[in-house]
Amino acid sequence: MKWKDDYLVAYVQSSDISEQELRKHCQSYLPPYMIPSIFIILDKLPLNQNGKVDRKLLPPPEFSSSADNLPHTTLEEQLQDIFSHAFHIESPHIDVTFGELGGTSLGAILALTVIRQQVSNKVDIGLLFTNPSIRQLARAIEPLLVLEEIQETASTVNENHETDIRLTPSFVIESLGIVLLVCQWLLPIMIIHQWCALLFPILPLCHLLFYIICSHLLSSRNIKDDNIFSWNYYRWWFLNQLWNNNTFWLQHILGTPLYNCYLRLCGARVSLNAHIYTTTIDAPWLLDIGDGTWIADKTTLNSLYFNDDYTFALHSIRIGCYCSISARSILFGEVDMQDNIIVQPMSSVTGFIASRTIIDGDEHKSASSDISITHSNRLLSIWHKMYQVITVISLICIHCTLLAIVYKVYSVEQISLPISIAFCWTLWSIVACFVTLFLLKFVVGSCTAGETYPIASWSYLHKVWLRQLIVSSFHYAWLLPTGHDYLYPFSLRWLGAQVEDDVKLSSIDIFLSYPTNLLKLETGVTSFGYVLLVPTEMTLEGDHRVDCITLGSHTNLGNFCSILPGSHLASHTMVGNLTRITRETNSNNGDIFIGVPARAMPFQMPIREAIDGQIKTIPFWMTCFSHYISKCLLIGIYWSCGLIGGLILHTIIVCSLYRWYLYADNKTIKQITGKVVEDHQIFVCSFLGNTQWLIRLFRAYGANIGNNVILPDFSSIFDYNLVTIGDNVRLNINAIIVCHTFEQRILKLVPVTVGNSCVLMTGSIVMPGCKLMGNNRLYPFTLVMKNDLLQPNTQWKGLPAQSYVAKSILSQSAPVCDDVFKCQQKSKNFDRLSLWNEKISSIYMNVNELQFMNWGYADLDEHIDDNSGYYSKKLYQQVLANISLTDQNVLEVDCGRGAGAAWCTRTYAPHSYVGIDPSRDVINLCEQTYSTIPRLSFMIADPKPYLSLQNESMDVVLSIETTNIFDEIEAVKKFVNEITRVLTPNGYFLWCGLCNLDGSGLLIDYLTTNNGFIIKEKVNITRNVLHALDSQSNSRADFIDRYIQPTDQEYCRLLAGLPGTQLYDNMQQGRAEYWRVVFRKKTTKKTPIV
């Protein structure tokens, strides 16, 4: 029976059964929610006069019964209090599971929420169910609290140190920059208007050339990493704002050689045969794009990176030849992509990417040998290029013709200026919308489902490129209708789409960019902001396929979701924010999808056949009337008050109207107000991005925003009066904060709080009700779900957001540590590796003691513990097994204390042997110890920047356990360039060290994809190295105990590979491997001239 509507209580009449037996029996036959919370065993059930069970006489359940029920720790006491409130039990037992206490699954969710808020955000539902009692849960949480305390302490120390160097925004520089941006935009218009109106077609050239001039004047390539709000930062800011203001003009030349030429004039290294369709670029001078690469529309090339120490960095983005990067992907950080890489839609890319990699979301996988990643000819012919140029010129002529027609109305002198211009503006918008539809229907035409278009084909140019060009060119005309306008479904039907009743679309651009005859929108479909219908699906051959998209009845498309060709969604489907739907997505009625690729959630939305929501369709006549009145107000403000006065009055009116707009009921007034606010966003706010003027404007709208906050544009936040943002918060482009939802067309508003020093990277979204407690970083494509609470000093990534520990670049060539604290310590220890040799050289007392520094190699049947370097010599023998050094010129990188170089010189009789090391102390020790050995020499040199050796002067280059010095891609590039230069044709580069499980690593991967080298031999010797470390453990541990200071012994033991340390355990437990590799230099590789 139910007890107080919360618990299921079982009364059993028996004298020979226990509660444990009953519970076990129920668990075998019943689902968890049907198992009673408590069993009460009676000798006899009380009966009433009718012989039925008298429920009033049944004894009440006792959920707590124990003599020892006192918590032993503060954490147990806190958890006991949480369990008491969540499960409605007074003083719950410490050692009894919440299920036995009468707890329900709903109570468990409530308890988990409170625990994450008050105790630790790292507790998940799995931890709670595997530790269901208070004492078990407390023991499981204690290590998490220790880790959080360590991280918070380290963060606090860093924050206190960084506060001293933090800069504040410059009001003067930002104001002067905004004035200059406005002037460079308006002056060409005013001059052309005064001289000759026929020169208006050259207006785009004036604006585009100004960016090129400014990028050279401000020395864009010399902008260095610096503090935020420094002079270097403001140089980048000004160029970025200029670029953003020119994107409308650039839309007309996307995918053409003209765009590639323009990028080259801006400082980019771009092949003329690349196909680039994106303008979302924040530092074009840092681009390096190879031949035949295709980059889709809406792809973000994000060079700007906000560091945690209030500095910024501009990272280069290198993309090799014949890569294919699909729509809405994000490239950020130090991107170095090799050739023939495929990036699926909505994927994030950073760091080094080897050739023949397929990136799908966060998953990177190499193409198997049975998959042929080939590319058809991607080079446009001269006729293709002429077609593109003629098409762009024709489109410009159409615009000029429309302007000439509406100019006749403007020239009528009897009509006042504001009225005539507003009428012309509205008339141009109406006519341009119909011209767009006419061109799409009768010039572009329809597509056939399943057709495949090579990039360099007439079909692709006509069906895909031309469609996108027309839609983007007339983008501002389609601002005439507002979101969910009646005109949208009507226009799509006329173009051939199957659109049923009650379809409400927030914008039409993305639907017009898709082959409309392949669209089927059933009754009640609703789309929200920034939805993308990807026009084509990319094949492994590099071609593009079109196909049908079907959206079932009452489907909801969330913000920033992407729908690919071939997708079919069942009725009542909800697609969450930042979600990608493909033909592989299996959809059932009522499914909710989240993620890339989309995953169905374990719950469904309630099905409502008739939805009476709050999204109302707007008649077309009301749209035109509202547009006309808003333009009359806009022109009247600036005509009567001038430019400066107009800007001030326009802003005051918009701020006043916005507050009133929230409570207005009249549809027409609300439409006009919305248009006035939209005009202010276009003509004023577009100049204010990343400045404190934009922050002041948001505050005027009602937002609560702290100091030194950076917001890239006006669309970064919505529902301003519900937003609270702390100090020093930084947002990248396309990161947004939302305080509303429109699930099933019902508006819900919940406040959002973002604490101090948070960083929201490109493509991250914060949903209503969320709280970021401070110093949080959201990585690209991170969705913070409704009502999430992110604890301070944490990083998050994923859909939905999950706690994340960023991997350093070192992790590409070294094993990954599962424990966060140990990982941080390990990276610090690697940074100290250079001190290991220096310390030993400074305390070196006996030449016969620990001469060799490498880990060694041992046959599996050998068991010798000595300190004479027996196993280390055997490691050299293994590396040199099939290579002769006799009469060869040999170079050893990071030679350590020189024992290996001396042994090789004596054993193999090379013509010359040079050992290099960046440490002066180490080289001095080498020279003192081995100065009498002929043909052996040592020199101070860092192999990363430059080797002071002649071109093609070395036959063999040796690198023994130097993984640590090649932990960054730039260091690897420079080192490979140097060994390529100094090696003779057919020379050998010999390497051994730690790798990932498949024998991959940053240096190995780079050399593997480098056209200058081929792999001659690659052998896994992990077991032999482990055996050598075991055999030498006693002598090495004794050396460290005697000669190393206690404070430094821990990291010296780690780097010596002693058993029990992280590096040793990684190899022993299969998380890392030790390989030796032989590379041979190709004879065709040209040697750089120094």
Image (tube, rainbow, N blue to C red):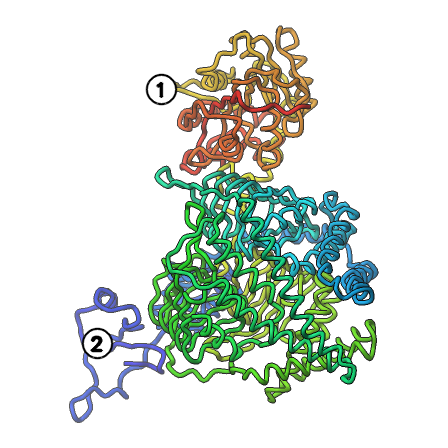
The amino acid type found where label 2 is placed reads Val
> Does residue 1090 appear to the left or right of 561 in the view shown?
right
Q: Which quadrant of the rendered structure holds the N terminus?
A: bottom left
- Measured as percent of width and height from the top left, residue 254 is found at 59, 54
- Measured as percent of width and height from the top left, residue 786 is found at 51, 69
Q: Nearer the viewer, residue 731 or 828?
A: 731
> Does residue 449 appear to the left or right of 890 in the view shown?
left
Q: Which quadrant of the rendered structure holds the C terminus?
A: top right
How many marks overall? 2
Q: What's the CA distance linking mark 1 and mark 2?
A: 67 Å
Residue identifier under label 2: 12
Residue identifier under label 1: 861
The single residue placed furthest to the bottom in the displayed view is 49
Q: Secondary structure at mark 2?
A: strand
Q: Nearer the viewer, residue 320 or 639?
A: 639
Q: Secondary structure at mark 1?
A: loop
Q: Is residue 977 above or below residue 324?
A: above
- How packed mark 2 is, by other alpha carbons closer than 10 Å (few <14, some 14-19, many 20 or more), is some
User: Residue 132's quadrant in the figure?
Assistant: bottom left
User: Residue 720's quadrant in the figure?
Assistant: bottom right
- Measured as percent of width and height from the top left, residue 583 is found at 37, 59
- Mark closest to the chain's N terminus, 1 or 2: 2
Residue drawn at 45 percent across, 42 percent down: 375
Decide if residue 117 is in sight here. no
The amino acid type found where label 1 is placed reads Asp
Residue drawn at 70 percent across, 65 percent down: 686
Residue drawn at 54 percent across, 50 percent down: 295
